[in-house]
Image (cartoon, rainbow, N blue to C red):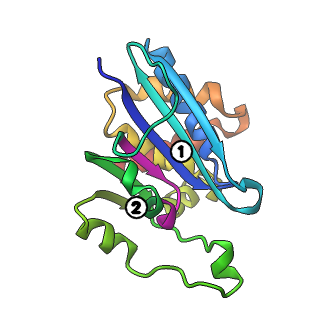
Amino acid sequence: MTTKNIMIVGVGGQGSLLASKLLGRLLITRGFDVKVSEVHGMSQRGGSVVTYVRYGDKVYSPVIDKGEADAIVSFELLEAARWTEYLKKDGRIICNTQKINPMPVITGAAEYPAGLEEKMRAAGIDLDAIDALSLAEEAGSAKAVNLVLMGRLARRLDFSDEAWEKAIEESVPPKFIELNKKAFHLGKMA
């Protein structure tokens, strides 16, 4: 099997690291060689966070270069736009439509870019944009956006719901398992 590349991008505090660990755990249980690399920006201050997840028969490097990502899972719209050059020509961006203002917008030094979804689609990007925040709230917590997006990603990966659920059970505290499973399934079915 050729190596597959998934990038998970977001803003610090959104749960992207948990999502990458859950995905890595799932892939390992399916018998793949997996490399996960976390690149933290100013995550504690709401800055960019990106995680590379690479899997296949044998993976030698954890880093994804420009034009290599089979999928980009983005927790925020502007973050999706920032990483488009890493997407393969036939890749897909799965994106939460939520907008989180970066510091330059908060301070008034810049404006949040308008029409990002339309611009990405006009550039030929296969964009699967969903309101993951509303689905997470429906599941019981706004913090479950990460599992909604993993559910959406699951539509592109050929793994059983049972395998995903087992990875969820092994990745989140027991009191949050059912909420996270619900968020996962809402994302998958949306």
User: In the structure shown, which secondary structural element does the residue marked by tag 2 occupy?
Assistant: strand
**Which of the two labelled residues, at mark 2 and mark 1, occupies the earlier sequence position?**
2
Relative depth, front residue between 75 and 109: 109
Residue 159: image x %, image y %? Answer: 36, 26
Compared with 164, 134 (above or below) is: below
Question: Few, some or many C-alpha atoms within 10 Å of disc 2 (few <14, some 14-19, many ≥20)?
Answer: some
Residue identifier under label 2: 130
Quarter holding residue 25: top right
Quarter holding residue 119: bottom left
User: Mark 1 and mark 2 in contact (Cβ < 8 Å)?
Assistant: no
Compared with 8, 162 (above or below) is: above
Relative depth, front residue between 38 and 157: 38
Residue 91 makes an appearance in the image: yes
Mark-to-mark CA distance, 2 and 1: 13 Å
Quarter holding residue 97: bottom left
Compared with 95, 146 (above or below) is: above
Residue at 31% x, 38% y is: 156
Question: Quarter holding the C terminus?
Answer: bottom left
Please provide the residue range marked out in magenta.
70-79
Tell me the kind of residue under disc 1: Leu
Lateral position of residue 106 relative to residue 182, left or right:
right
The label on residue 147 is 1
